[in-house]
Image (spheres, rainbow, N blue to C red):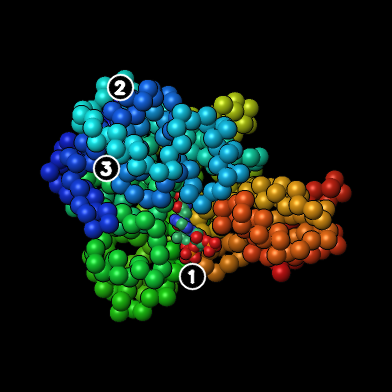
Amino acid sequence: MNLIQFFDLSLRGRREETALEWRGQTYTFGEIDERSDRMAQALLARGYRAGSRICVYLPNCVELIDLFLACVKTGIIFVPVNILYREREIAHITGDAEPVLFVDDPAELVREAASMPAERPVARLDGGSIAAIVYTSGTTGTSKGAMLTHNNFIANAVNLLACWRITASDRFLLALPLFHVHGLGNGLHCWLGSGCRMRLIERFEHAKAAEEFIDFQPTLFFGVPTIYVRLLDIPPETGRKMAARMRLFVSGSAPLPPQVLEDFRERFGHTILERYGMSETLMNMSNPYVGERRPGTVGFPMPGVSARIVEGEVQLKGPNVFAGYWRRPEATTAAFVDGWFRTGDMAQCSEDGYYTLSGRRSDLIISGGFNIYPREIEELLLEQPGVRETAVAGVEDRARGEVPVAWVVGDFDAGELERVCREKLASFKVPRRFVKVDSLPRTALGKVQKHLLAAP
Ligand code: MLC
């Protein structure tokens, strides 16, 4: 089965039902289907074909959904790009994916689509076809494109619908960016798989969150821990109004501090369900919908997913595991042992099967649910005059989990380094401080011991 055959449960099966609320306007599933048929025809009319890549650099909007579905309908590979990325980061992705098109403004395509017939293109796609390439920091090295197949996405969505009991009667509030697998694979696909009504918002904004919940009265919400930390500032009576119809809050993309889960339960009367995933595998593990949602754990493997711990590291097999890194056979080979995917995450498993993640093999930083690879920031800093040596590491932050800090050896102007970082890197990667040090702690072999860097 391909994704469109799966989404047809809603696109065709619930044609007349309201599918989407976006900026005060509503769209039925039939309209979503037709819009993406026209968009698909526009892409084909330009000569793009199955297997070509299209990079999409857009904030959440209905046109992004049209483009995603148009790609899925034609077999064109959808390559979402984080809208916070700057030129240097984007250049890496376009250099690697070699797209036929980079969309940072959909206006022209929308005009072309308007004159096209709403005719579903005929495409021979099966479950093994690549639907998307999602760029990830991976466990080592520079950003790599994870190739995700129709089967990967379908396995993920079917699991979430079943395990979290998502149905057409849900009301789903989606505030996550659609350029990552959390918003795309979990958000869009649970919506299209279940046929529920979804209100999409451009981004989570702390100041507007209460109003949005009270107005829409969702039953279902997906967030990253930072979002739940922000919601804790809301007074209890408002919290109750927001959650009047709520059924399920889910958290992922970064560890949810147990205290946040407890405080949230007190404030909103709901136990957040924590789950574990990554771009290369979509969702791997989840706390149970019925049963104990154990704070600090990510529950147990999803249906069809096998997990094992080898030297402390979680390794996985299953229909959710990606097809490899785009044009990087060596990195792909290195990511697997005997067919098991090496997640790079360290974990323990309790007697009764709950997994607790306890860190990473690499020095990846996760801030607000966005992944940061320190080496990328270090490389930029080393290009700057006066910087002799540098090491970037994450320091704890109440709201964002971690934030990056740079330790620098040399004669430099911290203000100037910050300016360069802001210009060249996504905002969440900009070090919150530049700490001047005489030397970096190193092992006898010269490797920087990041755990010894003093918290500033
Ligand atoms: C964050 N910023 C955005 C933005 N999100 N800007 C535009 N659009 C967005 N969607 C920028 C802001 O400009 C600001 O930059 C900084 O990030 C913090 O913004 P804030 O307003 O202070 O927000 P905050 O309350 O901290 O909340 C941020 C957040 C955001 C939680 C809304 O971090 C977010 O959307 N995170 C979701 C990440 C995500 O979807 N990850 C999934 C990866 S998939 P400045 O310059 O002021 O600092 C994955 C697999 C899995 O990991 O398992 O899910």
Q: Residue 429 lies in what quarter of the image?
A: bottom right
Label 2: how many Cα within 10 Å (few below 14, some 14–19, many 20+) = few
Q: Residues under labels 2 and 1: Cα distance?
A: 49 Å
Q: Which mark is residue 443?
A: none
Label 1: how many Cα within 10 Å (few below 14, some 14–19, many 20+) = few
Which one is in front, 195 or 20?
20
Q: Does the rendering let one see residue 343? A: no
Question: Where's residue 443, x and y in %?
Answer: 83, 51
At horizontal 44% and vertical 69% (from top left) the residue drawn is: 230
The quadrant in which the C terminus is found is: bottom right
Q: Which residue is mark 2?
A: 123
Which one is in front, 217 or 43?
43
Of labels 2 and 3, the one closer to you: 2
Q: Earlier in the sequence, mark 2 or mark 3?
A: 2
Question: Where's residue 25, x and y in %?
Answer: 22, 54
Q: In the image, what residue type sits under mark 3?
A: Leu
The quadrant in which the N terminus is found is: top left
Indicate whether 236 appears above or below 96.
Answer: below
Q: In the image, what residue type sits under mark 1?
A: Gln
Q: Which mark is residue 192?
A: 3
Judged left or right of residue 296, residue 411 is: right
Ligand 1 closer than 8 Å to the CB at disc 2?
no
Q: Earlier in the sequence, mark 3 or mark 1?
A: 3
Residue that lies at the very extreme toward the left in this rendered image? 16
**Tag 3 and tag 1, C-beta contact below 8 Å:** no
Which one is in front, 272 or 54?
54
Q: Residues under labels 3 and 1: Cα distance?
A: 33 Å
Q: Which residue is mark 1?
A: 259
Which one is in front, 400 or 79?
79
Indicate whether 366 appears above or below 434.
Answer: above
